[in-house]
Image (spheres, coloured by chain):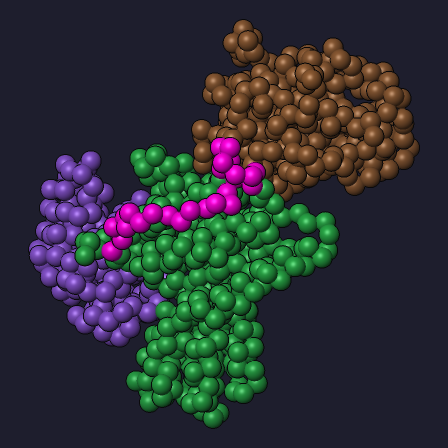
Amino acid sequence: MAVVFQRPHALTDAPFHYCPGCTHGIVHRLVAEVIDELGIEGKTVGVASVGCSVMSYDYFNCDMVQAPHGRAPAVATGLKRARPENVVFTYQGDGDLAAIGTAETVHAATRGENITVIFINNAIYGMTGGQMAPTSLPGQVTQTTPYGRDVKTAGYPIRVCEMLSTLDGVALAQRVTVDCVKNVNIAKKAIRKAFENQIAGRGYSIVEVVSTCPTNWGLTPKEALEWLRNNMLPYYPLGVYKDVAPEGGAK
Amino acid sequence: MPEKVLMKGNEALAEAAIQAGCRHFFGYPITPQTELAAYMSKRMPKVGGTYLQAESEVAAVNMVLGAAAAGVRAMTSSSSPGISLKTEGISYMAGSDLPALIINVQRGGPGLGGIQPSQADYWQATRATGHGDFQILVFAPSTVQEMVNLVSDAFDLADQYRMPAMILADGMLGQMMEPVALPENSGKTLPEKPWSASGHHGERKHNVVNSLYLTPQALESLIRDRFHRYEVIREKEQRAEEYLTEDADVVLVAYGASSRVARSAVEAARENGIKAGLIRPITLWPYPVDAIERAIPTVKAFLSVEMSMGQMVDDVKLAVNGRRPVYFYGRTGGMIPTPNEVLEEIRKIAGGM
Amino acid sequence: MDHLHLILAGFGGQGILFAGKVAAYAGLFDQKEISWLPSYGPEMRGGTANCSVCISNRPIGSPLVVNPNALIVMNRPSLDKFAGAMVPGGVAVVDSALIDKKIDRADVTAYYLPATSMAEEHGLRGLANMILIGKLFRETSFCTEESLWKAIEKCVPARKAEMLGLNKEALRLGMEYQG
């Protein structure tokens, strides 16, 4: 019988702990498929960051290091500088990357640190139970913005790809989502390119995945995707914000 | 025997680390340790190593964590306020059983404090270089030559026991020059690190370097294992120098810069007919309780001499456990005690016996 | 001299630390125990600079000299700060071109020489420090002469080789100064 669908080798058989409708699972799978396709599992080291995805070290089959909150880019820098022949990626959420680890993110990017960054932006803190994230939308109700995010007191959300695209060290800054088959395919191409850039030595590549958190948004999985399309995508437009090798990427 | 050269303590630490096989240094400038980073920035490119000036001490220590996880010898250095920032990473490294070297060239605190030499980070180094139940190895050199010697020992023991090691120096030792004979690169092969996240190359299961354990039973059991290792270290790795202690009535206990002052005071006391001696801890963790124990039968009193308001004196008291009086003399805020001040304390104690 | 506890003090830029290093290396070449400890930090930038040098037959305790038995001073604040701390019988060498004050103590020996003007007159600008070291050597023999010449050769970096002769000339000037 022909196998038409199977678990990528780069994923372990540990069952995901993610909530129903959470897009972490899809993104994990895309990363794993890319690792398989590029044949790099044996020399890939992933950095798990604090947040819902911290236990991704149990899901990816490559070597994994768990970093302190926000420090994944620094840990990845150490891993990559120690063994430049390896492929190093971080998998970070919005709190990790754009709040507590903003300095590490900006400086790894501006150094052109030759790493791949997968950035999950779901506009909320998932693991701690639904508090405001740096990317929570104006007016968005969270546990710590019970009357909606008031930009006068809580400030504005950060658009990470736009910000990082101003830095010379960045090779790729692309925002994608995984709400439908078409967008999943685009996301996979972007992730693949972010890994290929590293193999080609092009510098810091970040793929921001606009994601859902049905549990903490208080929506069903289907409603969550609707909410993402209607609220997040207008604020966080999909697209390529920087690409130093528009032709030289995926074949 | 290599020719002796004059080197600043900070530069000697850096060169010694390179000789010990360290090729990855991540730092951030702070007085009075900056010469160490500057030396590394000059030397590392010439030996095919990495020098990286991080955006903060926090980033630097986490780069060390990453490099250590990849299985190489990595280090960072800073001074007191910067070490506070590094404590997060040190705790994570201890919790992930990662070996690395951290150097603290202490200055006066708390807060921004001052920039003159101090030993006020003793509690931090030996009790709490971060949150959680853990210890790190702590070495306290008192000469530039000893700084050189302890660097390779610190790396070796950190690797052997899979834990972070610290060299607790101070502004005086970092800034002063003394003659040193640098070790020739021993060329010894560094230990294999089969646990490292260096890529499994299809030859083994994936390695995970991690400090997260959500089930309390698992975490407790892991920590208990680690503490069994600490017990072995307490038994095997204590180091201290005992100077004129055999017949001493008053034994001073001092490490690092203050031990140099204490030694001068002991000699002056002997010239004045007072039988004084010195125990100089070389490891601060594990604390050299055996050396204290050896002195107890003959000694009448102990005097801890520190450049702090009295931190190590706690460990002296724990070791003495009430069997002899333990006195303290210290200067703080960047002040260095003089031998005469210490001699005066010795006189007072000897006079009261 | 059995042990030298030297303080060199002046303004940043006068070569105080360098002069201390030359003295320290001379001790090293004599197979003595030595230490060199600078003042450091913001005060170095244009402010006062000083350094402690110990040369001894025995291991050196505190490298911080509190009561010097030898003193080289190149500005008035340093003379005010350190002259009173000298041990009885100590030797002070004072750059009288920069300091118009005398040391008001009968129990120390002070030598006054206008090192900065001497350096200017001999085309040795910036080398008053070496003139003063030369004078200290002449009056105390804190090291052997052979080691002192060796030390200056060691301390002048190869990329400034042209400075070596000038440094030696300055040392000689100090050694030969009468008064």
> Can residue B239 be seen in the rendering of this structure?
yes
Colour that chain C carries in the picture: purple
Residue furthest front as drawn: A1
Residue B115 visible in rendering: no
Q: Residue at x 23, y 43 (%)?
A: C126
Does B43 lie within the magenta span? no
Residue B200: x %, y % from top left: 51, 35
What's the colour of chain B in the image? green
Between residue B118 and residue A144, name the one nearer to us. Answer: A144
Magenta region: which residues?
B181-207
Q: Position of residue A107 (x, y in %)?
A: 55, 30
Up the image or down, A174 lies above or below C8; here it is above
Chain shown in brown: A
**Rendered-image quadrant of the N terminus of chain B:** bottom left
Front residue of this view, candidates A31 and B99: A31
In the rendered view, does B34 fall on the left or right side of A23? Answer: left
